[in-house]
Amino acid sequence: MPATRTIRRRRRTVAAVAALPLLAVVLGACGYGSEGEKDEKVAPAAKGEKIGGLDEVKIGYFANITHATALVGLQEGLIQKELGGTKIKPQVFNAGPSEIEALNAGAIDIGWIGPSPSINGFTKSKGQNLRIISGSASGGVSLVVNPKKIKSLDDLKGKRIATPQLGNTQDVALLNYLSEKGLKVDTNTGKGDVTVIRQDNKQIPASFESGSLDGAWVPEPTASKLVAGGGSVLLDEKKLWKDGKFVITNVIVSQKFLKEHPDVVEAVLRGSVKTNAWINENPDEAKAAANAKLKADSGAALPPEVIDPAWKNVDITDDPLASTLSVSSEHAVKAGLLEDPLLDGIYDLSLLNKVLKADGKPAIDDAGLGAE
């Protein structure tokens, strides 16, 4: 993995990349979230005094194991408990761009989301729309292949490999990996020495089993679903990163909401930190809670052959692993997805570090990319 280059502290502009409206693409046909639907599961009741008199806080997340903090924190009421009488209004999303769109529109205030949409959203708004305020998860991404068609990493040429979306975090990672292997792919069309097919995570397992895909670079639990369907893990992305750590999910907040309701944001972060601690201390109970939330959100729980390996493959952390965000941005530039992304000021870890200090935990570094 190449070393993180120094990011000059100045604002830069995002390139107008043909066929890459990374923030305008809304995958839900109706509204911002998963087909425009809110999470209708009865959440733990809001009790007590409202923080700052605020009635509700709108929180977005994905129904993915890589969003375990949100799944468990909402299911167990650990985040709601910190908010007292201020009620959580949750919303499930299919993709990062749609969640960024919702944040920009005020449809959500805080969200669990991947690094690439965070970078894209911050850059496109010239640093005005969001801040990353905490980490959540590391790892949980694999290249899974049909072992009859691909037996080694040298067999990728001429094959069809899926990613969840053009320009998303896994798409950037795959394009960078192929480039480092000397394999050329047109970023926009996905055509080249390897054919990169962009397809929704929900559709990839069926395409894989039908034989229309030879492999996929995907997050959990999709990776484990492919393995359960006969696939084989050819590469765990952790092996490409120093110490096996890289950000896959962080927490963002609208700058407007952060400025107007810092006490509410702090309460959500207290809930996030406590949730992460509970997950790491009680992995089996936390796994069950996450699966219960997935069932409530999607209508079906994951079977043991999927949830068990998926859960083990994701590391839960408060640290946003800021230096790895810088590396991800370099990969996006290299792939032609971004031109000089804006990173200066993308982090504001002040409230997270306040919460950590109160718990007797060390402060977390923003790799020089914090808001002044």
Image (tube, rainbow, N blue to C red):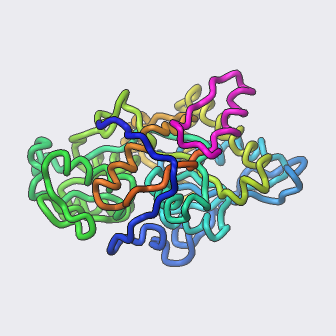
Q: Is residue 164 visible?
A: yes
Q: Depth check: 117 or 38 in front?
A: 117
Taking the image as drawn, is residue 292 in sight?
no
The picture quadrant where one finds residue 172 is: bottom left
The residue range painted magenta reads 348-372
Q: Is residue 106 magenta?
A: no
Side of 110 relative to 211 (left or right): right
- Looking at the rendering, in which quadrant would you find the C terminus? top right
**Which residue occupies 33% across, 55% down?**
333
| Left/right of residue 166 with respect to residue 214 in the rendered view | right
Which percent across, then down, holds residue 199?
32, 65
Q: Is residue 282 above or below residue 305?
A: above
Picture residue at 55% right of the left edge, 68% below the top: 101
Percent x, y of residue 84: 83, 46
The main secondary structure of the magenta stretch is: loop
- The residue at 39%/61% (across/down) is 202
The percent position of residue 126, horizontal first and vertical second, equals: 54, 62
- Could you tell me which residue is drawn at 23 percent across and 47 percent down? 177
